[in-house]
Image (spheres, rainbow, N blue to C red):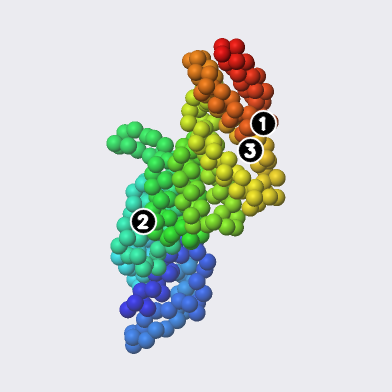
Amino acid sequence: MLKYRMRFIVLAAAVLTALSAVSAEDTWHLGKDQDWKPVSADAKGKFLLAVAETKKLVNTGQAGAARKAFDKLKTDFPEIATPDLDLFIEAELSFCKGKFTTAARTHNKLLTKYPQSQLRQAALDRQFAIATAFLAGRKRKVLRIFKIRGYAEGIRVMEQITDRVGLGSPMGIKAAIAVAENYEQRGKFNEAYYKWREISSQWETGQLGADALLGMARCKHAVYNNHPEHKRSQYDASSLSTAKSYYEKFRLLYPKDAEEIGIDQILNQINEQLAYKQFAISQYYQRTANRQAANLYYNMVKNNWPDSKVTKIAEEMLTKNLDMEETEK
């Protein structure tokens, strides 16, 4: 019975996902004598025609016609009528009606209840498509009245996909990258950073490793730059230091790529920002008449960032303070 079920569930997956056509030699049915026999070319042709018509109805949102087509398909080909197929059809009809959240959750129910189903990949593919639509800005209803962007729902579904298939799989990594990129696009740089770091933990080398490393650097830098420019020096600069270390690592590991995207220029900008941060601290102590602390930070600017634009000012202030100390003695 397991062999019987698996053969025809493969066909059911084709109904909804337009997978490559199944050849006649791959399609079998259980004969009256309980022996497995190949489906005739005529029967297969009828099935594939029904498949194509049903798929067209699903993808064009014709829910009523799709329901009738599904019912007819199950009647004409009773071999494919199984509980997981019923769930799949329920999910696909929800998708037809534009009920993306319901469709995603029904597919998730199928994947949880029937983890070995031959419809597994088809369900995952549909979930990925639904999540992609939400991440692109598709709205969903809240409390059956209000409509909001479905970003959170898209991320939830993508995370479910990654958890189910793993970061080591093509679909798992695609889902994780989609989440990281969406967070970045919406200015949620801390969340994006942690997602890129999760990807980096699985993919330390190769193109994915390079993309994740660059993503972490970019997000950490953006965390600092996200503050109003005239107030940035008032915020913690640890994200700048972290971004700098990631960019330097990227330049070391991928020198050609680093040159193409201008990593040296980015590092120069970060160094200027770090220098100005220390200079701003020295200015604070200067205003509060704590020349000793101010001199400490002036020296840090001078020694750590000798080429910075504020270094000359720091040196002048340091000299002025030292002269005043000598005068006061």
Q: Could you say where residue 134 lies in the image, as x and y percent from the top left?
A: 44, 43
**Residue at mark 1:** 306
Q: Is residue 160 visible?
A: yes
96, above or below 165, in the image: above
Identity of the amino acid at label 1? Answer: Pro
Q: Is residue 171 visible?
A: no
Q: Earlier in the sequence, mark 2 or mark 1?
A: 2
User: Which residue lies at the image location 60% right of the left edge and 55% below the top edge?
Assistant: 207
Q: Earlier in the sequence, mark 3 or mark 2?
A: 2
Q: How many marks?
A: 3
User: Which residue lies at the image location 43% right of the left edge and 69% below the top edge?
Assistant: 11
Q: Quadrant of the C terminus?
A: top right
Check disc 2 and report its element: helix, strand or loop: helix
Q: Could you say where residue 137 lies in the image, as x and y percent from the top left?
A: 46, 39
Identity of the amino acid at label 3? Answer: Leu
Viewer-side residue, 326 vs 288: 326
Identity of the amino acid at label 2? Answer: His
**Nearest to viewer (mark 3 / mark 2):** 3
Q: Could you say where residue 307 lies in the image, as x and y percent from the top left?
A: 68, 31
Q: CA distance from mark 1 to mark 3?
A: 15 Å
Label at residue 267: 3
**Residue at mark 2:** 107
Instruction: Answer left or right for 110 relative to 121.
Output: left
Q: Dot 1, crowdedness within 10 Å: few (<14), some or many (≥20)?
A: some
User: Which residue lies at the image location 36% right of the left edge and 74% below the top edge?
Assistant: 5
